[in-house]
Amino acid sequence: MTKRDEILDLIFEFALGMIRYCDLLEEKRENSIARQFPNSCTSIGAYIRESQNAENTADFIH
């Protein structure tokens, strides 16, 4: 397993754990947090994927 795959696997497991946690929050009626939290927890995967697929340093400048 490459370092790249290991990072993606860790982030995926983290996101799944946080989604399960959000399910518990919904059961406890913490709806405002439970609605926002999954987006925050899963966006890190998109950022990592974007950084790994950058073709050059100009891709990081927006």
Image (cartoon, helix red, strand yellow):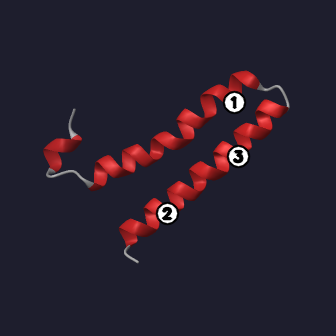
Q: Is residue 53 positioned above or below 25 on the image?
A: below
Residue 32 spot, x, y in % from top left:
70, 21
Q: Are marks 3 and 1 in contact (CB under 8 Å)?
A: no
Residue 43 spot, x, y in % from top left:
47, 40
- For label 3, the crowd category at 10 Å Cα-Cα, with few meaning under 14, some 14 to 19 and many 20 or more, is few
Q: Give the CA distance from mark 1 to mark 2.
A: 23 Å
Q: Which residue is mark 3?
A: 20
Q: As shown in the figure, which amino acid type bears the numbered disc 2?
A: Asp
Q: Residue furthest bottom?
A: 1
User: Image point 51% across, 42% down: which residue?
Assistant: 42
Q: Which residue is mark 2?
A: 9
Element type where label 2 sits in the image: helix
Q: As shown in the figure, which amino acid type bears the numbered disc 1?
A: Ala
- The reply, left or right, for residue 57 in relation to residue 34 is left
Who comes first in sequence, dot 1 or dot 2?
A: 2
Q: As shown in the figure, which amino acid type bears the numbered disc 3?
A: Arg
User: Image point 30% across, 50% down: which residue?
Assistant: 51
Q: Residue furthest top?
A: 32
Q: Which residue is mark 1?
A: 34
User: Image point 44% across, 48% down: which residue?
Assistant: 45
Which part of the image, by quadrant, shows the N terminus? bottom left
Who comes first in sequence, dot 3 or dot 1?
A: 3
Q: Nearer the viewer, residue 16 or 47?
A: 16
- For label 2, the crowd category at 10 Å Cα-Cα, with few meaning under 14, some 14 to 19 and many 20 or more, is few
Element type where label 3 sits in the image: helix
Element type where label 1 sits in the image: helix
Who comes first in sequence, dot 3 or dot 2?
A: 2
Q: Give the CA distance from mark 3 to mark 1.
A: 10 Å
